[in-house]
Amino acid sequence: SITSQNKQKRRGKVKSKLLAVSPTLNIMAELMFGMVQTKKKKETDAKLRQTKATEWNYQGRIDQDVAYLERKEKATQEQKIKEAQRVTKAHLKDITQEEDGLAKMRKAQHTRDQQWKETGRNQIKQNTNFDMARSLFGSGASGGAR
């Protein structure tokens, strides 16, 4: 049949025309494929960024956050320890300490040493008023005969 032959000829002509233009079509097809891939990659990256942003800005109930509960428990323990230290210091101020034997002995030695130092200071003051001539020659006004 003539029509089927004509159809085959036309297909052959179209094929030959496509083959002649195929290098540019091939390049265009590759560019289109690359553009589609780039678009898909951008969409994927945008979705990933959005997911990370929602993770970081999580607005869940704070009493269900494990890290928060651990920090709260540790802070509570530290506050209890500090309060115990404050109470202990306050109670230690009320304690009076009695002198034991060693403390009494040290206090007596200290008192004795302080008196000895005071005697030495007083002796220096008395020595400044000492008159050598009067002690050698006596208190009389008559010259040197005894």
Image (cartoon, grey):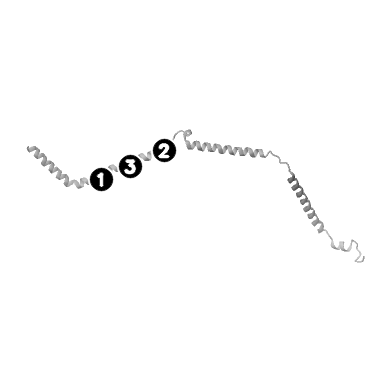
The reply to whether dot 3 and dot 1 touch (C-beta < 8 Å) is no
Q: Answer with mark 3 or mark 2, whichever residue precedes in sequence.
A: 3
Assign the C terminus to one quadrant of the image.
Answer: bottom right
The tag on residue 31 is 1
Q: Residue reaching furthest front?
A: 101
Assign the N terminus to one quadrant of the image.
Answer: top left
Viewer-side residue, 78 vs 60: 78
The residue where tag 3 is placed is 42
Circle 3 crowding by C-alpha within 10 Å: few under 14, some 14–19, many from 20: few
Q: Position of residue 22 (x, y in %)?
A: 19, 46
The tag on residue 55 is 2
Q: CA distance from mark 1 to mark 2?
A: 36 Å
Give the amino acid type for the residue marked by disc 2 in the picture.
Glu
Viewer-side residue, 50 vs 86: 86
Give the amino acid type for the residue marked by disc 3 in the picture.
Lys
Residue 13: quadrant of the picture:
top left
Q: Answer with mark 3 or mark 1, whichever residue precedes in sequence.
A: 1
Give the amino acid type for the residue marked by disc 1 in the picture.
Leu
Q: Residue reaching furthest right?
A: 146
Q: Position of residue 99 (x, y in %)?
A: 73, 43
